[in-house]
Amino acid sequence: MSKRTNMPEEKGLEHSISLVKEGYHFIINRRESMQSNVFKTRVLGRSAYCLSGSEAAELFYDESKFKRAGAAPLPAKKTLFGVGGVQGLDDEAHRHRKAMFMQLWTRESVDRLGQLTRDYYAKAAEDWVQQDEIVLYNEAKKILTQVVCDWCGVPLAADEIEKRTDQLSLMFEKAGEADFSHFKGWSARSKAEDWIEDLISQAREGSLQLNEDTPFYKFIWHKDLDGSLLDKEIVAVEVLNLLRPTVANAVWIAFIGLALHDSPPNSELTHEQLESFCQEIRRFYPFFPFTVAKVREDFTWQGYEFEKDTLTLLDLYGTNHHPEEWDNPDTFIGTRFIDSKQRPFSFIPQGGGDYDTGHRCAGEWMTLLIMQETVDFLMNKISYQLPEQDLSYSLKEIPSLPKSRIRMRDIRFNTPD
């Protein structure tokens, strides 16, 4: 019988306000003060475990110990994830739905996404060179909305680009808000789901013709475990689980602009150096602060007792900055990932574990590809100046972004030598 140890516990009846105020540092602050990668607190009116570091992350992604069904708070469902999506499924249902996403990642699909990203950047830059100034974050959201809709096969008319960009953006921009503005994210998701559901109905009725090789078509006609088509509401949620996270990569793009300013590479990057630079951006800068699950059944780990159905938070940002996992974790080192293998439980900006059956984000490769294309475009295809601006970012805001959103001036196309 394993020896039981009292888990460190934060005193007090409720700490949700502290979570909102401290943001990305909520778990880090307590991990450091308690000198423990595992501790207990109270959020959303109930007990919760907080985990940090690779060992705890590996535990968190053990499906025999934790489940996702019912774990995400209602505000997250109403903004980020939607109801009934793959993030909230477990066991065979999760594996079957995850396979629907994994089938999309073919070489042809990857190549097409890269080409679309290059094309839409080039098209946008034709307008940028005519303007006195652009805001990179805002432009990236519009570009990525067009890229992902084109790639997915979701019809997007020119006169609705702004509207759909705003809807997809508000889902992640307002997810961390604690005041009334949070409901803007709820409203945006509701409108976006109505948009996609209407297109699904048209496709199933035969009035809308779609390319059979696109993700949108495949999702519309995907069959669930019982052999029936997914309800259109569920299809809409899963389509938005492609669209919304892709547009959220605009956050990474803003940090690319910052990294190129603060830590510019010394020379033209090889593919290996480019990938390392982008991975270090994903490790160093904030994206998701944490992810959630619930304890499946009572169990004991390293002497700590975990009780069934208790909410559990895994610290993504803190694990990526954990001094037990990384040398000089709070220093940006663009070459850090050269000749090093990706570590599935210590490098977790978009979740950990494996892609095929686990809960690591199936679209992580899309993120890396879009980031690589962005770095190449900003370094090699155009030249620009950053005027004086506030480039700081706050770890108390979720999502965190450079205050200025990266303002760029004097944009010009580079001419071949």
Image (spheres, helix red, strand yellow):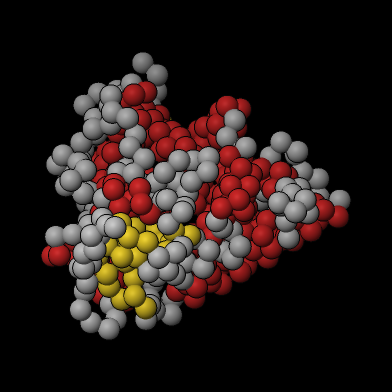
Q: What residue lies at 20% left-to-right and 41% top-to-bottom?
A: 326
Q: Is residue 383 above or below residue 170?
A: above
Q: Quadrant of the C terminus?
A: top left
Tell me the quadrant of the picture where the N terminus can be found: bottom left
User: Can residue 316 be seen at all in this image of the molecule?
Assistant: yes
- For this orientation, the residue located farthest to the top is 417
Q: Position of residue 179 (x, y in %)?
A: 39, 79
Q: Is residue 244 left or right of residue 42?
A: right
Count of labels in the image: 0
Q: Is residue 275 above or below residue 237?
A: above
Residue 167, x across and y down, in percent: 55, 62
- Name the residue at 40% across, 19% down: 416
Query: Which quadrant of the figure has residue 368?
Result: top left
- Residue 379, placed above or below residue 79: above
In the shown orientation, is residue 377 left or right of residue 230?
Answer: left
- Observer-nearest of 158 and 341: 341
The image position of residue 313, as x and y in percent, is 35, 62
Q: Mark yes or no: residue 265 visible.
A: no
**Position of residue 54 in the picture relative to residue 323 (left or right):** right
Given residues 388 and 4, the one toward you in this image is 4
User: Residue 92: where, in percent of width, then height?
Assistant: 60, 50
- Identify which residue is drawn at 52% across, 32% down: 114
Q: Which of the pair 191/353 is nearer the observer?
A: 353
View extreme (bottom): residue: 13
User: Residue 336 is drawn in which quadrant?
Assistant: top left
Q: Is residue 286 above or below residue 48?
A: above
